Amino acid sequence: MDAIEVLKTRRSIRAYTREPVPRKIIEDVVDCGRLAATAINIQPWEFVVVTDPELLRSIAQTTDHGKFIADAPVCVVVLCRDTKYYLEDGSAATENILLAARGHGLGACCVAGDKKPYAAEICRLVGAPQGFKLVSLISIGYPAESPEKTKRPLSDVLHWEEY
Ligand SMILES: Cc1cc2nc3c(=O)[nH]c(=O)nc-3n(C[C@H](O)[C@H](O)[C@H](O)COP(=O)(O)O)c2cc1C
Protein backbone atom coordinates (compact mmCIF):
# COMPACT_ATOMS: atom_id res chain seq x y z
CA MET A 1 0.00 0.00 0.00
CA ASP A 2 1.48 3.36 -0.88
CA ALA A 3 1.38 6.31 1.51
CA ILE A 4 -1.57 8.07 -0.14
CA GLU A 5 -3.65 4.89 -0.11
CA VAL A 6 -2.83 4.37 3.57
CA LEU A 7 -3.95 7.94 4.31
CA LYS A 8 -7.15 7.67 2.30
CA THR A 9 -8.25 4.26 3.56
CA ARG A 10 -7.45 4.59 7.29
CA ARG A 11 -10.53 4.22 9.49
CA SER A 12 -10.88 3.83 13.25
CA ILE A 13 -10.99 0.10 14.00
CA ARG A 14 -12.36 -0.91 17.39
CA ALA A 15 -12.76 -4.70 16.93
CA TYR A 16 -9.80 -7.06 16.56
CA THR A 17 -9.10 -10.69 15.82
CA ARG A 18 -7.25 -12.78 18.42
CA GLU A 19 -4.13 -12.89 16.22
CA PRO A 20 -1.16 -11.53 18.16
CA VAL A 21 0.78 -8.65 16.64
CA PRO A 22 4.50 -9.51 16.19
CA ARG A 23 6.83 -7.46 18.38
CA LYS A 24 8.85 -6.27 15.34
CA ILE A 25 5.72 -4.79 13.79
CA ILE A 26 4.75 -3.02 17.01
CA GLU A 27 8.28 -1.61 17.19
CA ASP A 28 8.06 -0.35 13.61
CA VAL A 29 4.68 1.27 14.27
CA VAL A 30 6.06 3.06 17.33
CA ASP A 31 9.17 3.99 15.34
CA CYS A 32 6.89 5.86 12.93
CA GLY A 33 5.49 7.76 15.94
CA ARG A 34 9.02 8.63 16.99
CA LEU A 35 9.68 10.21 13.57
CA ALA A 36 6.71 12.60 13.64
CA ALA A 37 7.02 16.33 13.14
CA THR A 38 7.63 18.14 16.41
CA ALA A 39 7.99 21.84 17.26
CA ILE A 40 11.67 22.86 17.43
CA ASN A 41 12.48 19.14 17.23
CA ILE A 42 11.91 18.80 20.98
CA GLN A 43 10.45 15.24 20.72
CA PRO A 44 8.69 15.35 24.12
CA TRP A 45 7.13 11.90 23.70
CA GLU A 46 7.46 8.54 25.34
CA PHE A 47 5.47 5.49 24.18
CA VAL A 48 4.36 2.74 26.55
CA VAL A 49 3.32 -0.44 24.75
CA VAL A 50 0.81 -2.41 26.81
CA THR A 51 0.10 -6.06 25.94
CA ASP A 52 -0.64 -7.48 29.40
CA PRO A 53 -4.35 -8.43 29.36
CA GLU A 54 -4.93 -7.34 32.95
CA LEU A 55 -3.39 -3.92 32.38
CA LEU A 56 -5.31 -3.57 29.11
CA ARG A 57 -8.52 -4.25 31.07
CA SER A 58 -7.61 -1.71 33.75
CA ILE A 59 -6.88 0.95 31.13
CA ALA A 60 -10.12 0.18 29.30
CA GLN A 61 -12.21 0.36 32.47
CA THR A 62 -10.69 3.73 33.37
CA THR A 63 -11.78 5.35 30.10
CA ASP A 64 -15.30 6.42 29.13
CA HIS A 65 -15.25 5.66 25.39
CA GLY A 66 -12.39 3.19 25.19
CA LYS A 67 -13.83 -0.01 26.67
CA PHE A 68 -12.78 -1.92 23.53
CA ILE A 69 -9.13 -1.51 24.57
CA ALA A 70 -9.74 -4.51 26.86
CA ASP A 71 -10.10 -6.75 23.78
CA ALA A 72 -7.18 -5.30 21.80
CA PRO A 73 -3.88 -7.20 21.74
CA VAL A 74 -1.94 -3.94 22.03
CA CYS A 75 -2.44 -0.44 23.37
CA VAL A 76 0.16 2.25 22.81
CA VAL A 77 0.00 4.92 25.49
CA VAL A 78 1.31 8.22 24.13
CA LEU A 79 2.82 10.40 26.84
CA CYS A 80 4.50 13.77 26.47
CA ARG A 81 6.57 15.96 28.73
CA ASP A 82 4.61 19.11 29.55
CA THR A 83 6.19 21.35 26.91
CA LYS A 84 4.56 24.28 25.10
CA TYR A 85 3.55 22.21 22.07
CA TYR A 86 3.13 18.82 23.76
CA LEU A 87 -0.40 18.35 22.44
CA GLU A 88 0.45 19.18 18.83
CA ASP A 89 3.58 17.02 19.00
CA GLY A 90 1.81 14.11 20.69
CA SER A 91 -1.06 14.34 18.22
CA ALA A 92 1.34 14.23 15.27
CA ALA A 93 2.96 11.11 16.75
CA THR A 94 -0.48 9.61 17.34
CA GLU A 95 -1.52 10.12 13.72
CA ASN A 96 1.76 8.62 12.50
CA ILE A 97 1.08 5.54 14.63
CA LEU A 98 -2.48 5.22 13.30
CA LEU A 99 -1.20 5.42 9.73
CA ALA A 100 1.73 3.07 10.29
CA ALA A 101 -0.68 0.53 11.77
CA ARG A 102 -2.81 0.79 8.65
CA GLY A 103 0.29 0.39 6.49
CA HIS A 104 1.06 -2.88 8.28
CA GLY A 105 -2.47 -4.18 7.70
CA LEU A 106 -3.47 -3.52 11.30
CA GLY A 107 -6.50 -1.69 12.63
CA ALA A 108 -6.16 1.05 15.22
CA CYS A 109 -8.22 3.61 17.08
CA CYS A 110 -7.18 6.72 18.94
CA VAL A 111 -8.85 7.09 22.34
CA ALA A 112 -8.75 10.54 23.90
CA GLY A 113 -6.29 11.15 26.70
CA ASP A 114 -5.50 14.84 27.08
CA LYS A 115 -8.22 16.79 28.97
CA LYS A 116 -9.93 13.61 30.11
CA PRO A 117 -10.59 13.22 33.85
CA TYR A 118 -8.98 9.77 33.72
CA ALA A 119 -5.65 11.03 32.30
CA ALA A 120 -3.88 11.06 35.68
CA GLU A 121 -5.10 7.56 36.53
CA ILE A 122 -3.78 6.16 33.21
CA CYS A 123 -0.43 7.86 33.87
CA ARG A 124 -0.37 6.15 37.27
CA LEU A 125 -1.31 2.76 35.79
CA VAL A 126 1.61 2.85 33.34
CA GLY A 127 4.08 4.37 35.82
CA ALA A 128 4.59 7.67 33.99
CA PRO A 129 6.98 10.00 35.83
CA GLN A 130 5.69 13.29 37.30
CA GLY A 131 5.24 16.07 34.71
CA PHE A 132 4.07 13.84 31.86
CA LYS A 133 0.75 14.35 30.06
CA LEU A 134 -1.37 11.60 28.58
CA VAL A 135 -1.98 12.56 24.93
CA SER A 136 -3.73 9.45 23.63
CA LEU A 137 -4.32 5.74 23.93
CA ILE A 138 -4.06 3.82 20.67
CA SER A 139 -5.60 0.36 20.51
CA ILE A 140 -4.07 -1.83 17.81
CA GLY A 141 -4.77 -5.30 16.41
CA TYR A 142 -5.66 -7.15 13.26
CA PRO A 143 -9.02 -5.77 12.14
CA ALA A 144 -12.26 -7.67 12.72
CA GLU A 145 -14.41 -4.94 11.17
CA SER A 146 -14.22 -2.61 8.18
CA PRO A 147 -16.38 0.39 8.99
CA GLU A 148 -17.39 2.97 6.43
CA LYS A 149 -17.31 6.58 7.51
CA THR A 150 -18.91 9.51 5.75
CA LYS A 151 -16.48 12.36 5.39
CA ARG A 152 -17.19 15.97 4.42
CA PRO A 153 -16.50 16.38 0.69
CA LEU A 154 -13.34 18.13 -0.47
CA SER A 155 -15.43 20.87 -2.09
CA ASP A 156 -16.82 21.75 1.38
CA VAL A 157 -13.50 22.10 3.12
CA LEU A 158 -11.03 23.30 0.47
CA HIS A 159 -10.82 27.07 -0.03
CA TRP A 160 -8.42 28.55 -2.57
CA GLU A 161 -6.82 31.87 -1.63
CA GLU A 162 -9.60 32.90 0.83
CA TYR A 163 -12.39 31.24 2.85
C1 LIG B 1 -8.44 13.35 19.64
C2 LIG B 1 -9.29 12.14 19.31
C3 LIG B 1 -9.92 11.48 20.34
C4 LIG B 1 -10.69 10.34 20.07
N1 LIG B 1 -11.27 9.67 21.12
C5 LIG B 1 -11.96 8.55 20.86
C6 LIG B 1 -12.51 7.80 21.96
O1 LIG B 1 -12.37 8.16 23.13
N2 LIG B 1 -13.20 6.68 21.66
C7 LIG B 1 -13.38 6.24 20.36
O2 LIG B 1 -14.01 5.20 20.16
N3 LIG B 1 -12.86 6.93 19.31
C8 LIG B 1 -12.16 8.07 19.54
N4 LIG B 1 -11.60 8.75 18.48
C9 LIG B 1 -11.77 8.28 17.11
C10 LIG B 1 -12.83 9.11 16.39
O3 LIG B 1 -14.11 8.77 16.90
C11 LIG B 1 -12.75 8.85 14.86
O4 LIG B 1 -11.49 9.27 14.40
C12 LIG B 1 -13.85 9.61 14.12
O5 LIG B 1 -15.13 9.07 14.40
C13 LIG B 1 -13.63 9.55 12.60
O6 LIG B 1 -13.61 8.20 12.15
P1 LIG B 1 -12.37 7.59 11.36
O7 LIG B 1 -11.18 7.64 12.30
O8 LIG B 1 -12.79 6.19 11.04
O9 LIG B 1 -12.14 8.43 10.16
C14 LIG B 1 -10.83 9.88 18.73
C15 LIG B 1 -10.17 10.56 17.70
C16 LIG B 1 -9.40 11.67 17.99
C17 LIG B 1 -8.68 12.37 16.87
Image: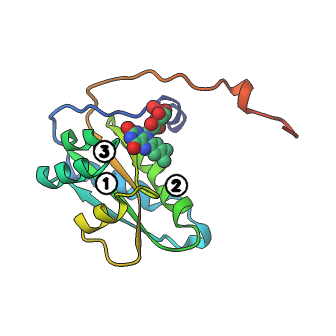
The image quadrant in which ligand 1 is located: top left
Q: Amino acid at mark 1?
A: Val
Counting from the top left corner in percent of width and height, residue 121 is at 29, 63
User: CB under 8 Å between callouts 1 and 2?
Assistant: no
Visible residue check, residue 25: yes
Name the amino acid type tagged 2. Ala
Provide the residue designation for mark 2.
Answer: 92
Q: Secondary structure at mark 2?
A: helix
Which amino acid type is shown beneath numbered disc 3? Ser
Query: Crowdedness of circle 1 by 10 Å Cα count: few (<14), some, many (20+)?
Result: many
The answer, for residue 21, to whether it is visible in the render is no
The disc, 3 or 2, on the residue closer to the chain's N-terminal end is 2
Q: Earlier in the sequence, mark 3 or mark 1?
A: 1
Read off the residue under disc 1: 76
Residue 95 drawn above or below residue 85:
above
The residue at label 2 has a CB less than 8 Å from ligand 1? no
- In the picture as drawn, the residue positioned furthest to the right comes out as 161
Q: Which residue has dot 3 on it? A: 139
SS at badge 3: strand
